[in-house]
Image (cartoon, grey):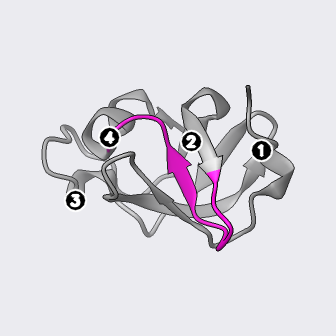
Amino acid sequence: MMVDLSSIKEHAEVIGADGVHVGTVDHVDGNRIKLTKKDSSAQIEGATGTHEGHHHYISEGLVAAVEDDGTVRLSANADVAVMFEEEE
């Protein structure tokens, strides 16, 4: 069952299944979550490549839940989730 992306709010924290910070929501763009530029996936241990200075997107398929406090929890650990991020 897919999560209703319309329940995701700007500036909500996005965390992996392991509780590690992945990013901060800029806004929802279609069926993807656009993360703010200020968050760099390169800060996550195990992440590779340069991820700074541009937006990243998380597909709705990786979203496991939107918690009561607004936090977006992913179905994958942070180091795995960043490998599925789309860049723009």
Magenta segment boundaries in residue numbering: 66-77
Q: Which dot marks residue 29?
A: 1
Q: Position of residue 25 (x, y in %)?
A: 61, 62
**Local secondary structure at mark 1:** strand
Q: Is residue 47 left or right of residue 65?
A: left
Q: Earlier in the sequence, mark 2 or mark 1?
A: 1
Q: Which dot marks residue 9?
A: none
In the rendered view, tell whether residue 28 sits above or below residue 12. above
What predominant SS class does the magenta segment belong to?
A: loop
Can you see residue 54? yes
Identify the residue at image location x=77%, y=44%.
Answer: 29
Query: Looking at the image, do the residues carrying marks 3 and 2 touch, with CB atoms under 8 Å apart?
Result: no
Identify the residue at image location x=22%, y=59%.
Answer: 43
Query: Looking at the image, do the residues carrying marks 2 and 1 touch, with CB atoms under 8 Å apart?
Result: yes
Q: Nearer the viewer, residue 71 or 46?
A: 71
In the rendered view, tell whether residue 17 sits above or below residue 31. below
Q: Which dot marks residue 43?
A: 3
Q: Position of residue 83 (x, y in %)?
A: 33, 30
Report which quarter residue 12 is drawn in: bottom right
Identify the residue at image location x=32%, y=40%.
Answer: 77
Q: Residue furthest right?
A: 6
Q: Which residue is mark 2?
A: 57
**Local secondary structure at mark 2:** strand
Q: Which dot marks residue 77?
A: 4
Task: Single out the mark in the foreground, 4 or 1.
Answer: 4
**Local secondary structure at mark 4:** loop
Mark 1 is surrounded, within 10 Å at the Cα level, by few (under 14), some (14 to 19) or many (20 or more) other residues, namely few
Q: Earlier in the sequence, mark 3 or mark 2?
A: 3
Q: Quadrant of the N terminus?
A: top right
Q: Is residue 4 left or right of residue 88?
A: right
CA separation in Å, label 4 and label 1: 22 Å
Query: Looking at the image, do the residues carrying marks 3 and 4 touch, with CB atoms under 8 Å apart?
Result: no
